[in-house]
Image (cartoon, grey):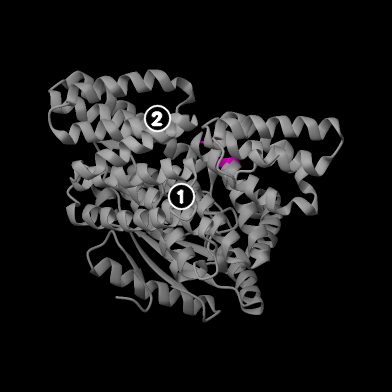
Amino acid sequence: MAIADPLENALPADACAAAHRARELAAHLQRPLEQGRAGAWHCAHLLRLGRHADVLREAQPLLAGLLQHAELAAERRDLLRVLTLSASETAHFDIALDAAHELVRITAALDEDGPALAATFALAVCFERMGDGWQAARLLTQAMRDHSGGADALPLMMAQNGLCATTLGLVYQILGTDAEPELTALLTSARAAGEAARVLFERLPNPAYEAAILLNLGEILVHQGDQAAAEPLLRRSLAVAVAGGLRAHEWRVRVSMAHWLIASGNAGQQALTSMEALLDDMGVAAPQETAIRAHHAAYRASRQLGLDASALKHLEAVERMNRQRTMTQLRAQSRLFVTRSEAQRAQWQADQARQDARHHRERAAEFAASAERDALTGLGNRRHLERRCAELLPAAQRDRQPLALAEIDIDHFKAINDAHGHAAGDQVLVALAQLLRDNTRAWDVLVRHGGEEFVVVLPGMGPEQAAEVCERLRQRVATHTWPEFGGSPLTVTVSIGLTATPPFDVAALMQSADEALYRAKHGGRNRLCINGQA
């Protein structure tokens, strides 16, 4: 059975077959512990082979059955990690988030650095695949600050390579923009993480890790313009992936090789042909991010060749897939407890979620009976804010839990009403209310405070985490597709003032948030200001 152990250096295809045989034998001999362990190992090898649909099919019954046994706690944690990664690659973000949050919860109870790093790595990959690479990179950076001292080489290597990969994902998001200094900084950061992973890999040789680490480093060098240094890394990664049957890695390397060909200057046709063949090869089995990058490489090659129709076709494919990913992300609704301190508050948030489920059942009748609903947007009104804060603030003070409050004001709202009428203004208010629902948790308090001003209360969040939520919301408002009036879409932005407890008094918090909002308005609008910060 040793060949089936993922920590051994067997080729993934051989190890996968061995794990499958071991699982069948254990089932025949009625040895459930060995059967569960072999099943978890089998899924780990399926992940390495890029067989994500098979992972989704096999992992969930194992987690619900054999891996409930206390002696298989380590295997359960690793299978949750594997399930998170495969579900993320196939855009099943509801499954990925559930698995990742369960992994964070159980590793928090261990208070061990290695498992905590592995859990954060899995959740960060989920965020990156959902299109939120900034959050993913922040999580991994914070986790390595918190846990690198006591972690073994393997989780450290995974985290460093994960940081390299997520930062590389951010590079793709800003390629072709005017953000040259930011692009340079991201590439430098990604390369440092990749080099650190490569050093750790030398102590833990393994084909799957070698293929991934060399791929990421080679791709970074391509975008840094060092084609000579990139080529041997990419070719070695491709050879390792092909020899090991690592199909998903092979596809990714072929995309990176296309970017290398484009950067070389005279091989656009070869790159375009390669990407169109790759897209045909992958078919419906294509991991979402790999397909997006393949279309992007084909778009760049087409532009280099002056093939406008081909370039447009691939660009439209990229845009379509990004829109699909964004829609999936919004539906998935991340629960946002991801760092170590947040994970330790998981039980408190679970209690809040249970209370919220009861509130959901009662909310319609309660709003109607107590007049706590804003008639236009369906959000709470001032009376709702006062009642919920009267419940949340004493509880937060008693349980020593943070709480944040944000005031959100639509910029130049009067100009929208004056130019297009109050019907247009009402459409903007209703759409913004929906954006608030889509980008907050179920237990957050959402209120239309009057006119164009909204208030959001974020229980369990300190200023740093709340600032990330508010900044993402600000960006999504600015990039939202607003209704057209007079032949052109509206441009809508918001200014946000944010504060956090203490004090545990709603009037004091509102005044503090209002002061921050005033600074945001007078600082140029379309920005976030935090109480106590410039």
Quadrant in the picture for residue 58: top right
**As displayed, is residue 504 above or below residue 62?**
below
Picture quadrant where residue 483 is located = top left
First to last magenta residue range: 91-95
Instruction: Determine whether, in the image, residue 203 is placed left or right of residue 65.
Output: left
Seen in the image, is 316 located left or right of residue 307? Answer: right
Between disc 2 and disc 1, whose residue precedes?
2
Query: Element under label 2?
Result: helix
Image location of residue 337, percent across then percent down: 56, 60
The quarter of the rendered structure image containing the C terminus is bottom left
- How packed is label 2: few (under 14 Cα within 10 Å), some, or many (20 or more)? many
Q: Is residue 416 magenta?
A: no
Numbered tag placed on residue 251 in the rendering: 2
Q: Residue at x 54, y 42 (%)?
A: 85
Report which residue position mark 1 lands on.
Answer: 433
Residue 117's spot in the image, x, y percent?
54, 60
Q: Residue at x 36, y 41 (%)?
A: 215
Task: Give the percent coordinates (x, y) of residue 179.
Answer: 20, 52
Residue 335 percent across, percent down from the top left: 56, 54
By secondary structure, the bulk of the magenta-drawn segment is best described as: helix
Q: Residues within 10 Å of mark 1 (few under 14, many from 20)?
A: some
Tag 1, which secondary structure?
A: helix
Going by the numbered disc 1, the residue's amino acid type is Ala
Q: Residue at x 28, y 25 (%)?
A: 314
Asked whether 309 or 372 is in front, the reply is: 309
Kind of residue indicated by mark 2 = Trp
Residue 80 in sight here: yes
Q: Nearer the viewer, mark 2 or mark 1?
A: 2
| Alpha carbon distance from label 2 to label 1 | 41 Å
Visible residue check, residue 380: no
